[in-house]
Image (cartoon, coloured by chain):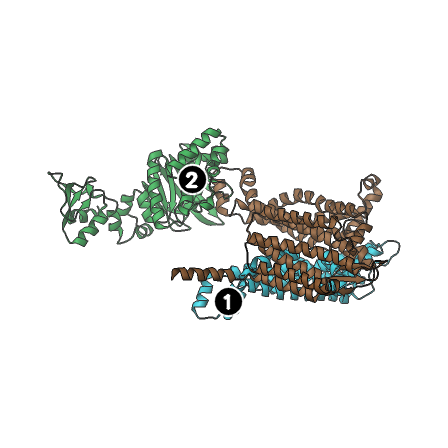
Chain colours: A brown, B green, C cyan
Amino acid sequence: MSQLSESASNLSSKISFDKVDILASLLLFFSLLGLPILTYQPNRLTSGTGRYLFDVFPGSIGVLILAVFLFFFFLIVRRLSVALTIGIIVVAMVGLFYLVGEGANYVLPKDAGFARVALGSGFWVACLALWLTFANNILKLRASPLFHVVVFIAMSCLFGLLIYVGLWDALSLMKEYKNELAFWSHARRHLFLSIASLVPAIIVGIPTGIWCSRSKIIKAAVFPVLNILQTIPSIAMFGILMIPLTYIATNYPGLGELGIRGIGAAPAIVALFFYSLLPIVSNTTVGLDKLDATIVEAARGMGMNSRQRLFKIELPLAAPVILSGIRIVLVQNIGIVAVAGLIGGGGFGTYIFKGLNQTATELVMLGAIPTLYLALFAAILMDSIIGFSKRKIDD
Amino acid sequence: MIELQNLNKLFNQTHAVDDVSLLVNSGEFCMLIGSSGCGKSTTLRMINRLIEPTSGSISINGEDVKSVPVEDLRRKIGYAIQGVGLFPHQDIFENIATVPKLLKWSKTEIEQRVEELLTLFHLDYETFAHKFPHQLSGGQQQRVGVARALAARPELLLMDEPFGALDAITRNYLQDEMLRIQKQLNITIIMVTHDIEEAVKLGDKIAVMDKGKLLQVASPIELMRNPRDGFVRELVGGDDRALNLLSLVKVEDVMTPIADIGKKPQSQHLSDKDNLRDALSRLLWVGESSLPVINSEGKIIGNVALVDILAKGKKQK
Amino acid sequence: MILRYLKFVFPLTALILLVLMIVDIELFSGFFGYFSKNSAPAIYVRDHYANIVGWHLFTVFIASVGATIVAVSVGVFVTRPAGEAFMPLAKMLANLGQTFPPIAVLALCVPLVGFGMEPILVALFLYGLLPIFENTITGLQQVPKPVLEAARGMGLTQGQRLFNVELPLAMPVIVAGIRVSVVINIGTVAIGSTVAAKGLGEVIIAGLLTDNMAFVLQGGIMVALLAIVIDKAIEIISPS
């Protein structure tokens, strides 16, 4: 009897489904069957016409590809061990990458001229579906925060390598990339601008936050100012900062030569500094304010002076909250730097606005996708650091 | 010796502590009792200057607490509180070592001291030293809290309702531990509580406070026998008082010894270390007017009669 | 005392300034004229400010209503037993919504939905999800267990518990999330004008393109005033 019920429960655990994986599988099939995986453009600036999986790989090859994906997803939905499932998903991702890269060669006529092949909505939705189930299974591992960073870097290397060896060379996106010789210098500039303002913001922001948590009056004076700074739109902030910076540059030529000019990097860095202050100051204040009063009381009662309390007890305990403030700032900066492209600040925003002006979709993507990627990487990296700072405090 | 003289504390015009004078001798276990908001915690916290008095003075061994820098003062006084306040980001070792580190003890000295303290509180060094506070039970956390307060061998320990948040069994156990440790280390303890049973059990001296005023300072027995009218009488339990009083006296103190020691008891009996309250309860339950008393070896050493017990519970002139 | 007084004086001043600027921007031509060079116009006159501010707010309103509906429904769903499996993923997606820079989302939307208001609606919608979603979950989770237990004991159905007990108790937290989301979006919506969305952003862009700081300043100041006023307005009407 007990054996019977045991085998019954085994059976039920075997056929129980993961809702997220099922949803993702359905999405994947819809995208592969119902949406164009590529688009064909007679030239760079015209909008394209969709090419479905069965257009690109007609007949039996298309059926074969679909069958392979079907098999993969049968395996995923079967709930194998999590590690194995993740492996299968990665293989499916590589397969999808290969599929569109190879498909572009099929679609592109030999004497192509100006014709282009771009990634279609089917590809993007399929990517989303695969990513959903990938993330779902990664989260199931409940691994250390560092693991997420390692996975992210490993995946970046894998797909970076696939693109590097020329898998996507037939795609319009890569053609834009090859046209833009300054891509990596813009990338460096984007990174530099995103980080350059962070250091001074931390140096100013954390002490200000500490001060605000100590004095209600300071807090009442500082927070409204920072709140207003935060509400000024980035494009306006860049513009407004041009006024004093142009003034400085024209009146102190020496400083102008150092790079302090009305357009370019200087307004971007100053603007980012202002935007960075509120999250850092307010998180520092909140982190210190919400500390368990008995802990601070105990530290005081044991004869720690205010400096010892601050550095040994309060700041370490508030670290996760302060670090979340820095996370917000870093991710936010990466986005705002893209806007700086509008005022000649450089970075990936340059491509976004150039692309928008020329209505060249692929050029927009060349700016937007790396921006998304950087923001995502910054978020995962910071989450990992925050996770570490939390570990000791509450498991 | 700790002496509080005419201590006053005003919070926005309200008298939180109103002209309190109290003398606690070295080696004494003094309980500060009263209902919440009566100023007992404020009084305690003025001793290590977590709160500065509005007026009045405090001296420890004749030395005014204001004559030493405040941090130095606090490092010499142990302090344990209800929420424990263990530092969650430091392990047990680091927590206990806090004050010795502040005092710049050597590494080996600190290690020795932590091990000594953990042993004193029946916590195994190997098991506990490198655990984090959240991995410990409430009772264990509180023991570490007291160990941390004792780390730098203070002569005075201040405790603010340290066992308030614990269940009855754990609380009872820790109270016994405190009695043992206080005897063993011969330190002075001032503890704040709102629980009269705790006060009677632990205190050599009980100071009752109400609305910021010190109403009565007395030994537990004295307090039971002659409580001041009003709050103190209510606190020690109007009609229960006789029973509370009995619980302070042991059977051996009232029994009539017998000549031929050594017999084993036939049936119902009492133990010499029982308190009179339990003895009375037993007598009533079995319906006898007297019962034999045995010692720790199980041999009869005397008799105790109902009348002897009743006499002890009577108000004394 | 003074602090409490300032709390009201400040937004009230902002409101008065904003109304004056909308009704008759010419009143400030002297001030803005100081920032325009080479006899360029100091005041943006291509459209009436009432119209511009109207579009600005309308865009934020549509995006915020959408974000609120989605975030609250998903928040309710993942706190029910049936939706628990989606909780980690939903949290991650909402997080991602705010990780993706609005300018990148905006640009990527243009090929899909064209120029105008639509791309910025998508960007704002995604950007505004997280605060509302997070607060919905927090609000629902911090409803005291005994209260829910009592509601169950009195025979309320699951739906009744949700609408009569849980949501009303969580409402202040949810509204706080909406407030954060709306205020962020009032500033963010300005970048929509880089892809021809109407609103105060177009004034700023016009200023940047013609190197006319008076326009940039006008647009920037009005957005900030708008954010201060709306923030206070939501605070006043929100349940406590």
Residue B209 pos. (x, y %): 37, 47
Residue B270 in percent (x, y) is at: 19, 46
Q: What amino acid type should be assigned to the residue bearing mark 1? A: Val
Which quarter of the image is occupied by the N terminus of chain A? bottom left
Question: Would you name the residue on which mark 2 appears?
Answer: B127
Protein chain holding label 2: B
Check disc 2 and give the amino acid type.
Thr
Q: Is residue A283 above or below residue C51?
A: above
Query: Against B71, is B287 above or below?
Result: below
Q: How many marks?
A: 2
Residue B84: quarter of image = top left
Callout 2 environment at 10 Å: few (<14), some (14 to 19), or many (20+)?
few
Find numbered disc 2 in the image and state the secondary structure of the residue it sits on.
helix
* Chain letter of disc 1 in the image: C
User: In which image quadrant can residue C168 be found?
Assistant: bottom right
* Residue A251 percent location from the top left of the image: 84, 42
Please provide percent x and percent y for residue A240. Answer: 78, 52
